[in-house]
Image (cartoon, rainbow, N blue to C red):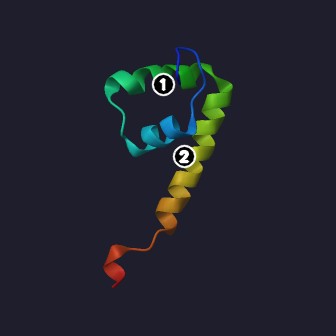
Amino acid sequence: MSELGDCLEAEMVARLLDGDLTAEERVPLEEHIAACEKCYGLLTESTEVWWRIGKDAPDDDSS
Protein backbone atom coordinates (compact mmCIF):
# COMPACT_ATOMS: atom_id res chain seq x y z
CA MET A 1 0.00 0.00 0.00
CA SER A 2 1.63 3.18 -1.09
CA GLU A 3 -1.22 5.46 0.02
CA LEU A 4 -4.15 4.99 2.37
CA GLY A 5 -6.84 3.02 0.57
CA ASP A 6 -4.53 1.46 -2.02
CA CYS A 7 -4.54 -2.30 -2.38
CA LEU A 8 -1.77 -4.48 -1.02
CA GLU A 9 1.37 -5.28 -2.94
CA ALA A 10 2.86 -8.80 -2.84
CA GLU A 11 5.82 -7.63 -0.76
CA MET A 12 3.53 -6.33 1.98
CA VAL A 13 1.55 -9.58 2.02
CA ALA A 14 4.81 -11.51 2.41
CA ARG A 15 5.95 -9.24 5.23
CA LEU A 16 2.58 -9.64 6.94
CA LEU A 17 2.74 -13.44 6.72
CA ASP A 18 6.35 -13.47 7.92
CA GLY A 19 5.50 -11.27 10.89
CA ASP A 20 7.93 -8.59 9.72
CA LEU A 21 5.59 -5.62 10.25
CA THR A 22 5.37 -3.34 13.23
CA ALA A 23 1.98 -2.81 14.85
CA GLU A 24 1.90 0.64 13.23
CA GLU A 25 2.30 -0.99 9.80
CA ARG A 26 0.12 -4.03 10.46
CA VAL A 27 -3.03 -2.38 11.85
CA PRO A 28 -3.85 -0.27 8.76
CA LEU A 29 -3.19 -3.29 6.52
CA GLU A 30 -5.53 -5.47 8.56
CA GLU A 31 -8.20 -2.78 8.44
CA HIS A 32 -7.83 -2.50 4.66
CA ILE A 33 -7.98 -6.29 4.23
CA ALA A 34 -11.17 -6.41 6.29
CA ALA A 35 -12.81 -3.89 3.95
CA CYS A 36 -11.36 -4.98 0.58
CA GLU A 37 -12.54 -8.20 -1.02
CA LYS A 38 -9.65 -8.21 -3.51
CA CYS A 39 -6.98 -7.93 -0.81
CA TYR A 40 -8.77 -10.44 1.43
CA GLY A 41 -8.66 -12.92 -1.46
CA LEU A 42 -4.98 -12.19 -2.11
CA LEU A 43 -4.14 -12.74 1.54
CA THR A 44 -6.18 -15.96 1.67
CA GLU A 45 -4.45 -17.40 -1.41
CA SER A 46 -1.04 -16.30 -0.18
CA THR A 47 -1.65 -17.86 3.22
CA GLU A 48 -2.55 -21.20 1.62
CA VAL A 49 0.66 -21.16 -0.43
CA TRP A 50 2.70 -20.06 2.59
CA TRP A 51 1.39 -23.01 4.65
CA ARG A 52 1.96 -25.48 1.79
CA ILE A 53 5.54 -24.35 1.36
CA GLY A 54 6.15 -24.60 5.10
CA LYS A 55 4.66 -28.09 5.33
CA ASP A 56 6.56 -29.33 2.27
CA ALA A 57 9.94 -28.00 3.40
CA PRO A 58 12.41 -30.71 4.41
CA ASP A 59 13.31 -30.96 8.08
CA ASP A 60 16.78 -29.73 9.05
CA ASP A 61 17.11 -32.76 11.37
CA SER A 62 17.16 -35.23 8.47
CA SER A 63 20.94 -35.10 8.02
Q: Secondary structure at mark 1?
A: helix
Q: Measured from the top left, where is residue 53 in percent x and y?
A: 52, 61
Q: Measured from the top left, where is residue 20 in percent x and y?
A: 36, 39
Mark 1 or 2, nearer chain start: 1
* Amino acid on which disc 1 is placed: Leu
Residue 43 vs 31, above or below: the answer is below
Q: Residue placed at 63% from the left, 45% from the top?
A: 45
Residue 48 vs 37, above or below: the answer is below
Q: Which mark is residue 53?
A: none
Question: What residue would you read off at disc 1?
Answer: 29
Q: Is residue 60 left or right of residue 11?
A: left
Q: Measured from the top left, where is residue 24 in percent x and y?
A: 34, 21
Q: Secondary structure at mark 2?
A: helix
Q: Is residue 44 left or right of residue 23?
A: right
Question: What residue would you read off at disc 2?
Answer: 47
Name the image quarter holding residue 22: top left
Residue 42 vs 25, above or below: the answer is below
Q: Residue placed at 43% from the left, 40% from the top?
A: 15
Q: Quadrant of the C terminus?
A: bottom left
> Dot 1, crowdedness within 10 Å: few (<14), some or many (≥20)?
many
